[in-house]
Amino acid sequence: MLSKLFKKKKLEVVAPINGKIVPLEEVPDAVFSGKMMGEGIAIMPKDGKVHAPIDGEVVLVADTKHAIGLKAKDGTELLIHIGLETVMLKGEGFTTLVKAGDEVKVGEPLVEVDWAYIGEHASSTITPIIVTNSEERTVESTATGESIAGETVLFTVVSK
């Protein structure tokens, strides 16, 4: 009985976009590959919108629309950083579909992205998905291969 009370819950983080799963260490940006912002994974997108990878609250929509922050009920904080050097685009190529304070469910669209525009005007379309409070959490079971938005489990998060 007590073991059930103390059993740690795992939060599954699913793919927010369709594409090729890439280890964070291979992201061509030292801030992400060096895990300075936290543990996670990245996706080289193929197409489609950016979807919620967890149930939770939208806590950040960057003014430049290139990044979305989410917080799960267990306290896990995620950052979806759409492309690299995309802050320089000042919102061009992005249409946000949510705002800070919104509650979202897995698979719900967050951002429409013009991937062709991003590919032409930013250094990369690769999209890191980061657990920004990973010092308080353990990231397990990172996936490989292809991702399907709203379906493919990228990794699980367990509170320390």
Image (tube, helix red, strand yellow):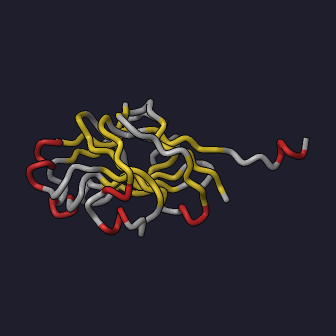
Which residue is depicted at the point 23% across and 58% down?
A: 84
Tell me if 118 is positioned left or right of 50 in this view. Answer: left
Percent x, y of residue 66: 27, 55
Nearest the viewer among 89 and 130 is 130
Percent x, y of residue 51: 37, 38
Which residue is depicted at the point 54% across and 61% down?
A: 134
Tell me if 8 is positioned left or right of 117 in this view. Answer: right
Q: Quick one: which residue is furthest to the left in this view?
A: 120
Up-down relation of residue 30 to residue 141 (above or below):
below
Tell me if 92 is positioned left or right of 112 in this view. Answer: left
Which residue is depicted at the point 86% across and 45% down?
A: 3
Nearest the viewer among 1 and 147 is 147
Quadrant where the N terminus is found in the figure: top right
Which residue is depicted at the point 13% across and 48% down?
A: 119
Decide if residue 130 is in sight here: yes
Q: Quick one: which residue is furthest to the right in this view?
A: 1
Up-down relation of residue 59 to residue 1 (above or below):
below
Percent x, y of residue 147: 37, 34
Quadrant where the C terminus is found in the figure: bottom right
Decide if residue 100 is in sight here: no
Percent x, y of residue 107: 42, 33
All told, the count of numbered labels is 0
Residue 114: image quadrant is top left
